Amino acid sequence: MAGHSKWANIKHRKGANDAKKAKYFGKLIREITAAVKQSGNDISANARLRLAIQNAKGANMPKENIDRAINKGSTADTADFTTIVYEGIAPHGAALIVECTTDNLNRTVANVRATFSKQGGSLEKHGAVSFLFDRKGVFTLNAEDIKDEEMLTLALIEAGAESIEHEPEEGYYHIISSVENFGNIQKELENLQLEPVSASLQYIPSTPVELDEEAFEKVMKLIEILEDNDDVQKVYHNIVSK
């Protein structure tokens, strides 16, 4: 089952350099710590922590790093974290959604607003662009782990998958589900003994904006600067290149 190309802006990228990998690990550690701080370190009772650890394992984070993040979140003097979503307009009318996990809201909103402004965009009110996106469950599987594509497809459709795409050049399968069926897909993948490279609820653009190469690169520069901010977990956009 294919034909769902709207996830393309958030697909997993291979070949990240060491600096980017370290930055990504830092964001995963922050998410684990925040999950523990919010709901405790019992994995069976903390869905957010379970998902964060799953994503860390999918990124090949060493077990000792995961354990340190859990211990840090269990420490009383660790700062409380808040998860917040910002919406903005990038140059050329592109829509961005910025997910953050922060221990200082004033710092985070000031930095995000300044980044938008310096790059020719603007931070907007809640609801300004989110209507241009659909909230979906997104799972990424390593293609090397798939032994029977037909069996996988049938099982995941039964569990509620809306779309399954194989990207041979990337080496991944991408599964899209509704928010309501996210847990069903998780359980079915566990039954199939498949551990995702990543699994999360994401914003999938429903109204793509096509940009020429120059405009596309300008928006991507804004996205890359936002992603370099330690408080920013993910950035979603609705742009495609001509």
Image (cartoon, rainbow, N blue to C red):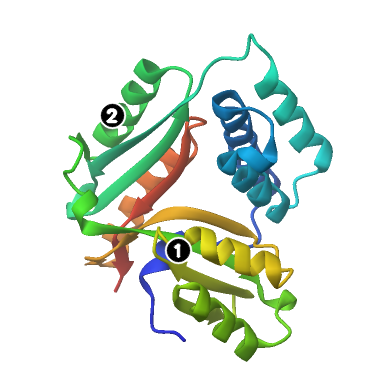
Amino acid type shown at disc 2 = Arg
Q: Position of residue 122 (x, y in %)?
A: 20, 37
121, 196: nearer the viewer: 196
Q: Earlier in the sequence, mark 2 or mark 1?
A: 2
Tag 2: Cα neighbours inside 10 Å, few (<14), some, or many (≥20)? some
Going by the numbered disc 1, the residue's amino acid type is Asn
Seen at 20% across and 49% down, the residue is: 129
- Place residue 104 in its image quadrant: top left
The secondary element bearing badge 2 is classed as helix
Task: Where is residue 50? Give x, y as percent.
Answer: 64, 45
Q: Outermost residue, front direction?
A: 45
Secondary element under disc 1, as helix, strand or loop, is: loop
Residue 145 picture location, percent across and down: 73, 75
In this rendering, the answer to whether 210 lies above or below 66 is below
Residue highlighted by disc 2: 113
Q: Position of residue 159 (x, y in %)?
A: 51, 73
